[in-house]
DNA sequence: AGTGGTCCAATGGTCCAACCAATTCTGCAT
DNA sequence: ATGCAGAATTGGTTGGACCATTGGACCACT
């Protein structure tokens, strides 16, 4: 007998039902990102369930990054939801040592290059203009503040991921980005970290504007290479100083 | 001033503290996958928090797939936990339609190519022999069962990710893989799905054995391309049949 | 020995009512 | 108008209670 012909049944689903109802509500009210959704107390009353159950459901959504709760303020929609959406929580074991950071960079290298290539293929004129705008902002921040600005730099890259048409790029790289910056705002004591990557932002943009996927891919790889070099330099310095 | 030099302090974090304590417990007791962890009531008593708080924490872990709760039985460890792990909840709009699957393939294309290239760079003789072994098994399964075997095929790819030296490849692609197969064991009714990808497994292996990163990358790209073609074929057929 | 049934303790799921802490709104004094 | 103190709102936490399911112990019968 095929043991798969009798799959385990699923009966209980109280809090899942709450989430399903909430999806319907978001749709019915046409809630946008950042909008506030009903109070826990109101949800509990309307859905005829305990507030505790509502909280368990919302806790799950919060863990999935779909929603943000602010005490005293409310619960806010943080990502689009739809009935047939797939949530794929991925937990990665990763420390903040040199090896882990290099590993995140290897992932980022692969995805950044692919995203840049796809972006060059698919960008509309409006998309290109938007990327150019982000590039200008970043370059101006670079000149006035004399150094790479994490914030504006990140905005530029995000614009590229968005134009690539595949939201997974932004989601995965964002996770890598967060891991990278969580403990290493100035990684390993390298003061002008990321400085060397500056010129490649414009070359990437130029290849995208020229609708040159392979060129965009190549420039993206060069950019990541400079970051890897910075990281290696920092690791070497750290190793040296620890030998005192 | 760098606004990131003053990270937001954490004043209230009861349930996060619970999870941190739980990580410590799992480590201290050397719990393995599938082991049962303490009951909610015991945790609440030991950690001096309410059982509800314990439940919120466990709910978060359950949502992230780290833990499985069985009423009347207990809570069981479902994945490895570590103090500094990265949670990366991916949300894929649209569920099981053609677009979503193509998006996962775009990610897989980028990572598969990079992993193959890194593998070709770093593989030892023993690694190459191991990959050859997986390849033989897969090819034999292909001949005897007259078609691609998901299981053996996946083993082969996993071996490559492992040799790449970066565990992130395997983790991320595994998530994609699971997503891909969850609803599409025989995607879109294409009976010999994946059949066309068969020859490229050997060519990838040959490029790795020859320590040819660029070649391995190119062959990996060809393999993904065949899968994309299969998917497009299936989508076209589906579209046709729905026009009845 | 094995089969099936019953009971019972343990465990997760739900509920309730209250209070705490952060935020936001309100209205009064200036 | 402006600014500040207090009230109202909202998520966070607590403790206690009960329900539903599970799994093992025990037992009667074959």
Image (tube, coloured by chain):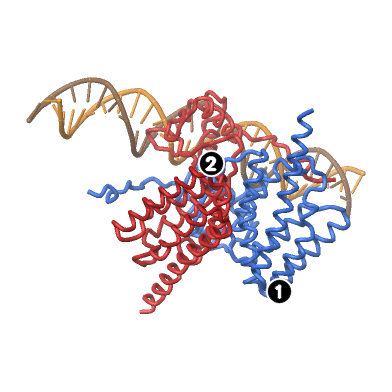
Chain colours: A blue, B red, C orange, D brown
Disc 1: which residue: A210
Give the vertical position of B159 relative to A30 (above or below): above
Residue A152 x, y percent position in the rendering? 77, 57
The secondary element bearing badge 1 is classed as loop
The secondary element bearing badge 2 is classed as helix
**Direction bottom: furthest residue:** B244
Q: Decide which of A122, B98 is in the foreground and name it.
A: A122
Residue that appears at 73% across and 51% down: A227
In the image: residue A17, left or right of residue A6: right
Neighbour tally class for label 2: few under 14, some 14-19, many 20 plus, Cα within 10 Å: many
The tag on residue A63 is none
Residue C16 x, y percent position in the rendering? 49, 38
Q: Decide which of B240, A200 is in the foreground and name it.
A: A200
Residue B217 x, y percent position in the rendering? 55, 59
Disc 2: which residue: B60
In the image: residue B244, left or right of residue A59: left
Residue B172 visible to the viewer? yes
Q: How many marks?
A: 2
Question: Does the residue at mark 1 contact the one at mark 2 (Cβ under 8 Å)?
Answer: no
């Amino acid at each position: 007998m095929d043991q798969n012909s009798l799959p385990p049944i699923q009966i209980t689903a109280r809090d899942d039902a709450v989430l399903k109802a909430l999806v319907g509500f978001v749709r019915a009210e046409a809630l946008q990102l950042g909008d506030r959704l009903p109070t826990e107390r109101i949800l509990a009353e309307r859905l005829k369930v305990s507030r505790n159950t509502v909280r368990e459901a919302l806790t799950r959504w919060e863990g999935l990054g779909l929603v943000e709760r602010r005490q005293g303020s409310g619960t806010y929609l943080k990502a689009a939801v739809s009935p047939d959406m797939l949530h794929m929580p991925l937990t990665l074991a990763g420390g903040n040592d040199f090896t882990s950071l290099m590993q995140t960079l290897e992932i980022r290298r692969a995805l950044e290059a692919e995203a840049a290539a796809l972006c060059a293929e698919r960008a509309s004129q409006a998309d290109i203009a938007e990327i150019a705008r982000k590039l200008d902002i970043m370059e101006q921040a670079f000149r006035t503040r004399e150094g790479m600005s994490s914030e504006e730099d990140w905005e530029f890259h995000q614009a590229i991921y968005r134009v690539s048409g595949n939201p997974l790029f932004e989601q995965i790289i964002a996770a890598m980005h967060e891991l990278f910056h969580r403990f290493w705002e100035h990684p390993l004591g390298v003061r002008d970290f990321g400085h060397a990557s500056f010129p490649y932002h414009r070359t990437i943009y130029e290849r995208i504007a020229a609708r040159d996927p392979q060129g965009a891919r190549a420039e993206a790889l060069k950019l990541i290479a400079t970051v890897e070099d910075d990281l290696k330099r920092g690791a070497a310095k750290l190793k040296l100083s620890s030998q005192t």
